[in-house]
Image (spheres, rainbow, N blue to C red):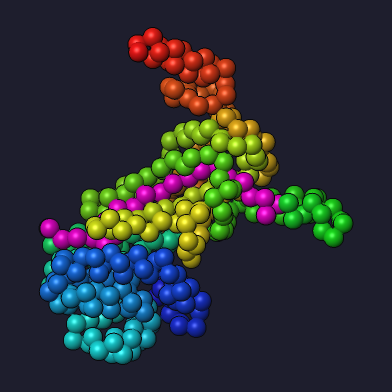
Amino acid sequence: MDQYFESYEELNVNVHQLMLSDKPRNLAYKNAIFHCKHLFKDKIVMDVGSGTGILSVFCAQAGARLVYAVEASNIVEIAKNVIEENELTEKIKIIRSKVEEIDPDSIEKVDIIISEWMGFYLLHEGMLDSVIFARDTFLKPDGLLFPHKAKLYAVPCELPSMFSFWDDIHGVSMKCVGKEYRKAKSLKPEILSLDKESLLADEVELSELDLKTISVPEISKLGGDDYFFVCDKNGRFQGVCMWFTVVFPDGTQLCTKPGYEVTHWQQTVIILPEDLEVEDGQCIAFKLELIKDESKPRAYKIELDILDADEMQHKVPCDCHMTKCIAIRQFLSDTMLKCE
């Protein structure tokens, strides 16, 4: 069995308690399911990567006639006990298998696919591939997916708590140590919990995924555009923060943005090797791309290039403090006054 499934094998590892303790995660799914009881009533559901079975139980409690709980790891032995404890053995059928290895003729087509497939920066762990396979193989043409949309965002940010620590440790300056620490941290993304005050500008949307139509090739590469920001305060550009939102058919959202209730995903931060001082109204630009790692198909390579915002074509009107943008804003304002 591959390492991904082995990581979910034992109940005493932190991963299951971490997810089951994640109140925003659990309630987003439960609320979406129970708001849509009329859609679940007497229907057949597939739970892809069912783990301990909590989502399968929610679906059965909401009125599903049958739930296929698909799980490839040994945690199914625990899930069986959970299902028995909740007296749902007649409604929930555990299938211990990768979804890709289930014989399509062995089960009925399903009305709904539910899955908690999201990883860090949305796509880490590559489980969306399995959901897409399940959709194409087992979902009825008019079937539903929970969630059915996902969006990935990015924004420049500060990381004061990570680096100011080294400035003064009981009266001793250790900035040189902090510099080496920062070099190491900039080599790979960090999973952190930021507050909204750490964000330097409004976010941009890197990608929107419609799970009803998205294909595996389409998620092999996300982002890739040049992204442009206008800072809304003075600060230090120290990293790029990414988070995601998923949306359910009833409109329920699960959002991992800084300032929302913290989830186990927190936020993914790409740390810059050096600070860039920025001012309110100053432009920041970068190119950000997520590319599936061919050698590790459950992971993505994240490529970040900082661009010279002064040399880029600015939107019109632009709120930055460059002279040409100020002049354009004034011209547009004067034109509007004349029209009035």
215 with respect to 338 (left or right): left
* Residue 99 at least partly seen: no
Magenta extent: 141-163
Q: Is residue 174 above or below residue 320?
A: below
Residue 235 in the image: x percent, y percent? 65, 39
Q: Is residue 57 magenta?
A: no
9 with respect to 303 (left or right): left
* Residue 29 at least partly seen: yes
Residue at coordinates 28% horizontally, 78% vertically from top-left?
57
Q: Is residue 269 above or below residue 317?
A: below
Q: Considering the image in quadrants, where does the C terminus appear?
A: top left
In the image shown, does 220 or 307 lie closer to the viewer?
A: 307
Q: Is residue 154 magenta?
A: yes
221 with respect to 288 (left or right): left
Among the 4 quarters of the image, the one containing residue 35: bottom left
Residue at coordinates 31% horizontally, 49% vertically from top-left?
209
Query: How many numbered discs sit on the rendered protein?
Result: 0
57 with respect to 165 (left or right): left
Q: Is residue 254 above or below residue 324?
A: below
Q: Looking at the image, which residue sits at the far front? A: 340
In the image shown, does 239 or 298 lie closer to the viewer?
A: 239
Residue at coordinates 50% horizontally, 27% vertically from top-left?
319
In the image shown, does 24 or 101 lie closer to the viewer?
A: 24
Residue at coordinates 51% horizontally, 76% vertically from top-left?
14
Q: Considering the image in quadrants, where does the N terminus appear?
A: bottom left
